Image: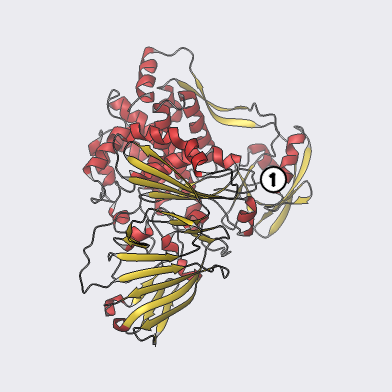
Amino acid sequence: MKKIIIIISLILTVSCSHDIVKETSDSPKIRYNIDVTDYSDDLFHVTVNVNNLTAQNSIYNMAATAPGTYQTLNFGRFVKTFSAFDKDGKMLNVEKISTNKWKIENPEKLNKIEYDIEDSFDAGVTEYPVAPMCGSGIENDFIAINTFSVLGYFEGLQTNPIELTLDYNPDWSIGTALPIKEGNIYYAETFDHLADSPILMGKLTFAETFVDDISVQTFVYSSDTSVTASKILGLAEDVLQSASGFIGYSPVKEYKFLMCLVDEETFIRNKLYGGGALEHSYSSFYVMPVNGEHLGGMRSTMAHEFLHILTPLYLHSEIIHTYNFETPTPSQHIWLYEGVTEWASDIMQLRGGLIDSDRYMELISQKLRMNEHFDSTLSLQEMALNSFSQSGYGSFLNFYERGAVTASLLDIRLLELSNGKKGLREVFLNLLEKYGKYKPFSEENFFDVFVEESYPEIKDFIDKYITGSESLPYKEYYKKIGYDYIPIRVSENSRPSIGTNVGMNDDMQLVTMGVNDEAKSWGLQDGDIILSLFDTQITMESVREIFGKISSMNVGDPFVLKVKRGEEEIEINGTLQQRMEKHIFVPIENLTEDQKKFREIWSKNL
């Protein structure tokens, strides 16, 4: 999952595999139907036709979590009605036994179940809120469905084949990676396959290109009709083509980008606390604001999601391979699934000639600055293992920051040890060949496998910077490729600062992030809930206008910031500061021969 964080903005924008199962005449036939022809009630109307169940199949499960989300979701809480019937239409007794489970009496007689389920966009939950790209939404001009957010499965039948039909507005088009069996019937080999296949329907535009032999299709709903699929694909065409050189082969035949680009009013009305993209094996699903700020970052986000066709689709542990939708089970290898993928999405642009090394180092600087907003005492391993907790999910975003920088340093270390012959890309591709889609690696032993595929010295790197939380050696490592490190300097941006960035907490409240030392001396702390600035109450609707006033003010001008800390409201008196920049890398003017040679190898290693 790629989640985008916007600092001081109206909106904080903050895979699984399947085995082919042969269907026999006496095996349960599972046929789902989702009816949204009349969506005025804001509900999905689901019918599941089934036969040949046994006592072992008496429980119908809604997902508690899903691949790529790394968070507790509990979609059962959105179910509004639930009924079960035999073949004569007689209602069977059903008991809801937990948030996500319904037990059906006499499952041998079951012919169908019917239930209505609310979309998660406007559900307004505060505990375990669902990011929009991880849930479902019903709007006037589009309907977005992550299938795991609407459809469940019978106990013991997670690996059975599935058919799906959709009833929807006939004037709409549809985008999904699910294959069509015949007519309007979609087919999934297993529930995992179904859950891995989101659906977008509505007033969509369409565009297609090819990356080597991969048909890359883009389906876009946009509230701004000038933003079309062709425009989006045009923004990312060159970066997607750079993936071809990085990967070196075509691991899939088709890939689909499914995008909901909506206006700010929709985000505010639905109280969406974030936006971004969620990876799937053959597609990725986006819910983002449709504005220039976000469209500008679309290239890198699409590159990141596209590269997930490598991991976790082809390279993953047994935890991902046989996914537990009922009980959130963390994997310690999110550093690989997200951190290495984020690194790859940047480095392939450098090595593909789309950006130069100075721009690449600017991206590293940005990630190191974002890293300061997170707990530095947590290792990447600990962050992964805590990802399903309420507190742990807040640290998850650092996989795109510290995780990616760690991968960048690991690449440099590998190139150094191999005299430029084997970097992280080569080790990664070797592991893909060794394992692949249907052969998971050992969750427990993968670090040892990684060392065996590389060099003994890499164990020390893993112990210090992946399973351990030692400070990253970026000053030392990036000097090897000809860059000096400057911890802090005066910014060229003349816009004053209030001494803190602004983000959003799990309760969708605006909070301080990265409070600097001077602001701390006024009494400001990280995590303070911001109530007002310049004696004006701050809301999601007013935040941009209020903070925009700073642009017309000067360094040294006084301001009053009111915050809430615990149950106490505190008034902070401060003065606008000169903006500073941290974690700057500048090219060394007179490179040594070793630095010249190593930078050449590093920047072109394909």
User: In the image, is 549 to the left or to the right of 387?
Assistant: right
User: In the image, is 12 to the left or to the right of 70?
Assistant: right
Q: Is residue 343 visible?
A: yes
In the image shown, does 41 or 448 lie closer to the viewer? Answer: 41
Q: Quadrant of residue 176?
A: bottom left
Provide residue 211's location: percent of width, then percent of height.
36, 37
Circle 1 sits in a helix, a strand or a loop, which is it?
Answer: helix
Residue drawn where x is 62% and y is 50% of the image: 263
User: In the image, is 266 to the left or to the right of 400?
Assistant: right
Provide residue 175's location: percent of width, then percent of height.
43, 53
Provide residue 209's location: percent of width, then percent of height.
40, 39
Residue type beneath disc 1:
Arg
Residue drawn where x is 67% and y is 60% of the image: 567
Q: How is the image coloured?
A: secondary structure
In the image shown, does 464 or 277 lie closer to the viewer? Answer: 277
* 129 in relation to 98, above or below: above
* Label 1 crowd (10 A; few <14 / some 14-19 / many >=20): some
Residue drawn where x is 59% and y is 40% of the image: 293
In the image shown, does 120 or 91 lie closer to the viewer? Answer: 91
Residue drawn where x is 72% and y is 41% of the image: 548
In the image shown, does 527 or 418 lie closer to the viewer? Answer: 418
Provide residue 392's location: percent of width, then percent of height.
47, 54
Q: Is residue 468 visible?
A: no
Residue that badge 1 annotates = 544
Q: How many marks?
A: 1
Quadrant for the C terminus in the image = top left
